[in-house]
Image (cartoon, helix red, strand yellow):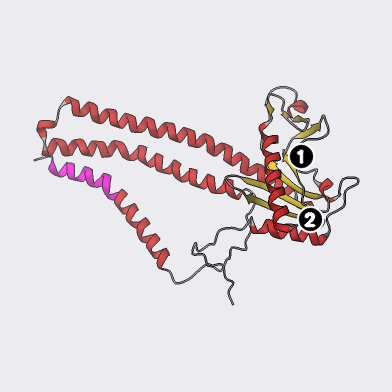
Amino acid sequence: MNAFYPSLIAVGVTLVPVLLAAGILYLSREREARRRRRSPLTSEILRPPGYSLDEKTRDLSLDLVIYLLSAVWAPPMLLSMYLLIRVFTPEADTPLIWVMLALTAVGILVFTMVRMLRIASVLRRYRDGLAGERATAQLLEPIIANGGRVLHDIEGDGFNVDHVVVAPGGVFAIETKHRLKPTTGPRNENAKVRSDGEALRFPDWTDTASMRQAAAEARWLTERLTRATALQVSVRPVVALPGWYVERTAPGGVLAINPKNCLFMLKPKPGEQALSAKHIQRIAYQLQQMSRLPDPDGRGNNKRDT
């Protein structure tokens, strides 16, 4: 039993920080739940650009931390288990126990490393996408300055529309795509993407999924707004490619643009009637209902302060 106290210390060093952190988290949540104050913010706040991606990024970042802590915590915990076995059941201290514990440690480390690598890859994509959505939102600001409305992150059933523009030129559902440019080859060609309305032809690959996605989102939004406003709303799909020079090679289909060239949305097509300020407001109101942030208190209390 001479090893009892060292074993107890090893177990304590392993378990106490974990139990302490869990206790602090629990008490913090209990304190938050019992507080007698509520947020002055209401659900009338609209979603900012990239809200959905930002939420996913935060969730994945937390998952990454959990896997990292698991990888760090597992080896000393298994060592503590071995010391306890050695003290209380020395007859079980056999090479088989060593092998089992070692394989368990290796299995945990391999699993957590693979998960962390996958999460890190997804996080990079989400962060790139978030940067693209924020850049597009900034480039769409001239629409607002000229009497149009721009709303962000309109939530659908299992998807979201990155941006919606409501302007005299019509209603536009904008799907942002952040694509990295090649680092080899002619600089001018590497910055150019060709669009025929059905596919985006980048210097080193072709993308048709983005065009189909934008068209599907525009159809969904057309049906939703027509039903909600009692107006015949026709939403045009647009793929925004911030930082790219877009060359259109054929008419029709889904429009692809660099969002800095967005002022065309302020004017209707030849032969079409401009949206009136009244209709713009009516459509924008319905979009606002689809772009509300969740109640900050999470208690369903959306009333204003009196």
- State the image coordinates of residue 94 (x, y, percent, origin top left): 15, 27
Left or right of 110 in this view: 78 = left
At x 78%, y 44%, the residue is 260
Name the image quarter holding residue 28. bottom left
Q: Nearer the viewer, residue 230 or 92?
A: 230
- State the image coordinates of residue 230 (x, y, percent, origin top left): 74, 57
Residue for badge 2: 148
Residue 11 on the magenta segment: yes
Name the image quarter holding residue 69. top left
Which residue is farthest right?
271
Left or right of 215 in this view: 29 = left
- State the image coordinates of residue 118 (x, y, percent, origin top left): 48, 33
At x 66%, y 46%, the residue is 162
Task: Name the amino acid, label 2.
Answer: Gly
Q: Main secondary structure of the magenta part?
A: helix
- State the image coordinates of residue 107 (x, y, percent, origin top left): 33, 30
Q: Is 89 located above or below residue 52 in the figure?
A: above
At x 27%, y 47%, the residue is 15
- The image quadrant where one finds the C terminus is bottom right
Left or right of 53 in this view: 170 = right
- The image quadrant where one finds the N terminus is top left
| Distance from Cα at disc 1 to Cα at disc 2 | 18 Å
Residue 258 on the magenta segment: no
| Mark 1 crowd level (few <14, some 14–19, many ≥20, 10 Å Cα) | some
Callout 2: SS: loop
| Mark 2 crowd level (few <14, some 14–19, many ≥20, 10 Å Cα) | many
Q: Which residues are magenta?
A: 3-17
Callout 1: SS: loop
